[in-house]
Image: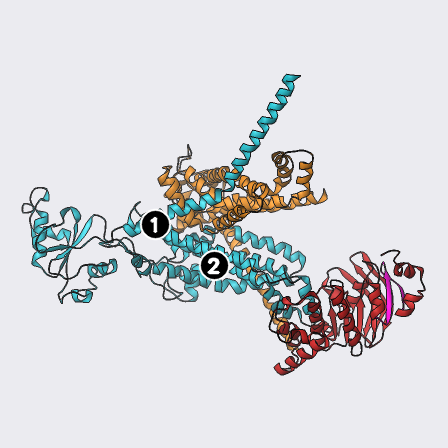
Chain colours: A cyan, B red, C orange
């Protein structure tokens, strides 16, 4: 007797402990998405912000000028212009009126023989110093190891980090350019916005039209077939859309507009519009169907036609839902990677028109991350792009949420 | 002048109205009473073809308004509804300003210019006994009004397009007693200009506002006569039972 | 009557738009099926690519995708379901739940390429899994977590409270109620959500670019630390980087068709299950 009650007591105790354990496991998993977001933020920003302590010239190299040169700093864009011979006089940079003479490290071997440079090039820095000291307009790009330190007549430009304004204000994206990688994100941001916004301009009237058709005009049977069909559109993988765009749309765009290449911003916008349609249609249609019957009846009872009722009552009533649909559609378009990568031509230049190739942020990450050496400025810049994308979509999710909560006052 | 001749109405298989005939004269108030689900609202909604909006319904018989069958092919439903105003059970103002609510019918029917609309809105609000209460806040959202005011706004909205007939589907059922009495006073004063048909579940209300009363039960029109007569000496036993509260 | 005319024009426009969008859908599907169907053969499905992927089949890519689908589900499904149970059954309606819900919403809005970046930084580099099935499964699992959570929550919400109170009133504990009453009833809808997320995983490319995907790897994986090929990535590679477009296009069409077929079948299965179980619940 006693042993059996003892046993039941123990069982009950055990069960209670198990319940506690399960409950705490559930609690932890409840927090998992919050933890995941936190981790994403930490890792993206940790890698990304490393960019702003990366040197603005290639790692392990320095720039040297003549000691009489008054220039103290050069930003990455100026360095690139100098080495592309687009800036040829120091006066353009605020220095003395002196022609710029480019000196690349290899050229030292034209000036001196191996013997003169000493054993294991021990005399190389010294000789380098001589060359630089002789030429007032010179700028030399040399490995830090052989830099002519503490030699009269030579000034080694301080190694600077890439700045926020280099990154966000830079108009050139050439991460592999030497001596100074150009990590200006402006062309990518503008390319992304151009493609996405034009996609929405195409998709919004189409999507709204179809939503109106589905919610107001189509009979029940048509609706029951069409709606799942449109939801299927949403399920097709983006790489398939990209492939379709590549083999079908690209030639069409090229022929229609008589372009050199069919891979343009416009092609990307069309594909993105098709991809954003299901989201816009579904959300907008739900919003319109939520317009209370009483509103429609009131309008019709006043002699309004069905169409007047739609655009004067139903659409305004569903306005918040429709705008949420638009915002979500933009969000999807901005983040879309594969389809855009495959059809926009990926030229990382400031976009000038819809009929030229552009490069979006996600496409850049996808195309370049594989080639960027881990931990380098390029790699960190790609993570920074990820941060930008993350922040944009975060803002968009929150906006969509706020908008869709702002339902019209339903009165009583 | 409204006339219904041998009306039968079906929701799918459900026979909602059974062979109903009655005539309502101009500038009178006719009330329909009866227990829930008796068909009184369905009958009312036949006259501005509101039942068209429900799928799977079927109608036989004739509905005449001023001698014209409103279900004939030559009738434009929108024009018909303009001529026959309707007030619903629950106030259903649009999420627009007070002014725009009243102006809505004028605008969708292309009736008049700006100054006409302004004038008509004021007249309608005055006719609905709401003008004094809202004249300083015409731009405010209609939802800021109280329930009773909203319902009067809906009446003003219906009046604005100058209908000749006003259908009211339990217009006071969601309102407090004070608002209800205001609506009832309004019905009295509107009678001289409009033909009013009102559905109500409240027998005292029917007795107070109407000239004639029809009593419906399970899709049948049991009795239709002068209101006074109906309430003092009903002909049918079912009417007697309903009025004295034995069911319903 | 001019407003009659404008209604007429508007409605015709909308009908046209409706047919246009449906037309686009059938165009895309029809095009892929038409071009791909002649490529599909038993050999195509069961052999490895040869000749620099200009001939041969896609077997390793199919196996790879299968591995990733299973791997991500093993990770995301239990976590997602438990998370949904917590927020729906335990946590009440306080700020914690609201916060979690906002986070879940936001997680579902993050572009898939960002998941790819994150997966590379955390799983591949920091945790040292390398390019592997494990790293990609975890990344994809995270990607579909919001979907699993949302569908599970909806399934749980659909169960009337009376069942819970009924069970509790009989002296069952909360956990027993969830296990014996709530979960069995919600099961069909939870499974439907699970199937939908399978469809999502099998089509994703961006997150696996840097976490697992192999350009060309004709052998099958031995462990979860191996790289694999995957259908979506294979399609991307074959479509964009072939040296001889004429030779590799048919392979691309075939791969696209297989990919679409998998995704559509999964979606149809989910739709069918939802209808089937929906009816069953109603007749009960």
Work out whether residue B233 or residue C11 is closer to the camera in this orientation and state it: B233
Magenta residues, dominant SS class: strand
Residue occupying the far left of the picture: A116
Pointers 1 and 2 within a single chain: yes
Residue C234 occupies which quadrant of the picture? top left
Residue C212: x, y in percent?
Answer: 40, 41
**Which residue is tagged 1?**
A48
Q: Nearer the viewer, residue C84 or B15?
A: C84
Q: Nearer the viewer, mark 1 or mark 2?
A: 1
Which type of secondary structure does the marked residue at label 1 adopt? helix
Tell me which label, 1 or 2, sits earlier in the chain: 1
Q: In the drawing, what numbered circle is on residue A330?
A: 2
Badge 1, how many Cα within 10 Å: few under 14, some, many 20+? many
Horizontal side of residue A233 vs A1, given as left or right: left
| Number of marks drawn | 2
Taking the image as shown, residue A357 lies to the left or right of residue A293, namely left
Q: Few, some or many C-alpha atoms within 10 Å of disc 2 (few <14, some 14-19, many ≥20)?
A: many
Chain under disc 2? A
Can you say whether B149 is above or below A2 in the image?
Answer: below
User: Residue A283 placed where, x, y %?
Assistant: 56, 57
| Residue extending farthest front | B178
Q: Nearer the viewer, residue A112 or C40?
A: A112
A162 shown above or below C187: below
Between the residue at mark 1 and the residue at mark 2, the CA separation in whole angstroms equals 24 Å
Q: Position of residue C64 (x, y in %)?
A: 45, 39
Q: Is residue B83 visible?
A: yes
Q: The magenta stretch spans which residues?
A: B210-226
Whether residue A368 is visible to the viewer of this picture, yes or no, is no
**Cβ atoms under marks 1 and 2 closer than 8 Å:** no
* Quadrant in the rendering for residue B82: bottom right
């Amino acid at each position: 007797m006693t042993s059996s009650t003892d046993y039941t007591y123990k069982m009950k105790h055990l069960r209670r402990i198990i319940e506690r354990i399960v409950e705490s496991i559930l609690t932890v998993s409840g927090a998992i998405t919050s933890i995941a977001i936190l981790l994403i933020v930490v890792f993206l920003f940790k890698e990304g912000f490393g960019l702003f302590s990366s040197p603005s010239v290639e790692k392990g190299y320095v720039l040297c000028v003549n000691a009489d040169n008054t220039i103290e700093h050069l930003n990455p864009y100026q360095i690139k212009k100098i080495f592309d011979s687009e800036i040829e006089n120091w006066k353009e940079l605020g220095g003395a009126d002196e022609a710029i003479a480019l000196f690349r490290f290899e050229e030292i071997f034209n000036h001196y023989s191996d013997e003169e440079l000493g054993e294991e090039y021990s005399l190389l820095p010294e000789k380098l110093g001589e060359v630089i000291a002789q030429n007032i307009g010179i700028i030399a790009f040399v490995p830090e190891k052989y830099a002519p330190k503490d030699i009269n007549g030579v000034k080694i430009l301080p190694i600077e980090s890439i700045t926020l304004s280099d990154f966000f204000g830079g108009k050139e994206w050439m991460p592999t350019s030497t001596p100074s990688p150009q990590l200006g994100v402006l062309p990518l941001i503008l390319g992304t916005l151009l493609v996405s916004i034009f996609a929405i301009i195409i998709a919004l009237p189409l999507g709204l039209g179809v939503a109106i058709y589905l919610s107001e005009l189509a009979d029940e049977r048509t609706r029951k077939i069409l709606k799942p069909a449109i939801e299927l559109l949403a399920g097709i993988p983006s790489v398939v859309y990209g492939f379709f765009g590549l083999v079908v749309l690209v030639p069409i765009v090229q022929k229609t507009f008589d372009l050199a290449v069919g891979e343009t911003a416009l092609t990307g916008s069309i594909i993105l519009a098709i991809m954003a349609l299901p989201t816009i249609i579904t959300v907008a249609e739900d919003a319109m169907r939520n317009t209370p019957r009483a509103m429609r009846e009131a309008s019709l009872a006043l002699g309004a036609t069905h169409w007047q009722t739609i655009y004067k009552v139903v659409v305004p009533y569903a306005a918040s839902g429709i705008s949420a649909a638009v915002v979500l559609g933009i969000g999807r378009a901005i983040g879309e990677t594969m389809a855009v990568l495959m059809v926009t031509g990926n030229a990382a230049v400031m976009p000038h028109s819809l009929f030229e190739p552009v490069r979006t942020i996600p496409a850049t990450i996808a195309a370049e991350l594989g080639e960027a050496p881990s931990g380098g400025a390029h790699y960190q810049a790609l993570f920074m792009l990820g941060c930008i994308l993350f922040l944009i979509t975060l803002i968009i999710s929150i906006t969509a949420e706020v908008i869709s909560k702002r339902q019209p006052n339903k009165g009583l | 002048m409204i006339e219904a001749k041998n009306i039968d109405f079906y929701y799918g298989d459900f026979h909602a109205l059974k062979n109903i005939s009655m005539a309502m004269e101009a500038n009178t108030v006719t009330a329909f009473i009866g227990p829930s689900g008796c068909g009184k609202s369905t009958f009312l909604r036949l006259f501005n073809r509101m039942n068209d909006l429900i799928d799977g319904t079927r109608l036989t018989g004739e509905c005449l308004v001023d001698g014209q069958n409103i279900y004939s092919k030559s009738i434009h439903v929108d024009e018909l509804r303009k001529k026959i105003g309707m007030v619903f059970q629950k106030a259903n103002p649009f999420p627009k300003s007070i002014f725009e609510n009243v102006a809505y019918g004028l605008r969708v029917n292309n009736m008049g210019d700006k100054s006409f609309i302004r004038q008509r809105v004021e007249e309608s609000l005055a006719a609905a006994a709401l003008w004094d209460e809202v004249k300083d806040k015409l731009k405010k959202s209609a939802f800021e009004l109280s329930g009773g005011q909203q319902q009067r706004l809906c009446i003003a909205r219906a009046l604005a397009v100058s209908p000749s007939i006003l259908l009211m589907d339990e217009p006071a059922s969601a309102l407090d007693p004070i608002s209800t009495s205001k609506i009832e006073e309004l019905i009295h004063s509107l009678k001289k200009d409009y033909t009013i048909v009102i559905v109500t579940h409240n027998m005292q209300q029917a007795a107070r506002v109407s000239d004639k009363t029809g009593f419906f039960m399970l899709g049948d029109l049991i009795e239709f006569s002068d209101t006074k007569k109906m309430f003092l000496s009903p002909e049918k036993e079912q009417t007697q039972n309903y009025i004295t509260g034995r069911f319903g | 009557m001019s407003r009659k005319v404008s209604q007429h024009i508007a409605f015709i426009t909308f009908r046209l738009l409706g047919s246009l969008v449906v037309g686009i859908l059938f165009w895309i599907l029809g095009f892929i099926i038409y071009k791909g169907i002649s490529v599909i053969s038993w050999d195509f499905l069961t052999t490895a690519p040869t000749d620099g992927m200009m001939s041969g089949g896609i077997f390793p890519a199919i196996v790879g995708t299968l591995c990733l689908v299973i791997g991500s589900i093993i990770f995301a499904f239990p976590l997602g379901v438990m998370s949904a149970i917590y927020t729906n059954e335990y946590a009440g309606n306080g700020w914690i739940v609201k916060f979690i819900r906002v986070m879940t919403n936001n997680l579902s809005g993050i572009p898939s390429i960002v998941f790819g970046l994150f997966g590379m930084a955390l799983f591949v580099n920091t945790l040292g899994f390398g390019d592997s099935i494990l790293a990609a499964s975890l990344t994809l699992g995270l990607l579909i977590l919001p979907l699993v959570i949302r569908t599970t929550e909806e399934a749980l919400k659909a169960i009337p409270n009376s069942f819970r109170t009924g069970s509790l009133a009989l002296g069952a504990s909360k956990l027993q109620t969830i296990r014996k009453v709530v979960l069995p009833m919600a099961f069909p809808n939870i499974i439907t959500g699970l199937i939908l997320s399978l469809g999502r995983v099998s089509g994703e490319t961006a997150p696996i670019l840097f976490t697992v995907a192999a350009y060309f790897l004709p052998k099958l994986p031995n462990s979860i630390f191996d790289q694999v090929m995957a259908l979506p990535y294979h399609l991307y590679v074959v479509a964009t980087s072939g040296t001889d477009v004429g030779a590799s296009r048919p392979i691309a069409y075939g791969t696209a068709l297989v990919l679409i077929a998998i995704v559509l079948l999964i979606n149809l299965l989910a739709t069918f299950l939802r209808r089937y179980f929906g009816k069953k619940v109603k007749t009960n």
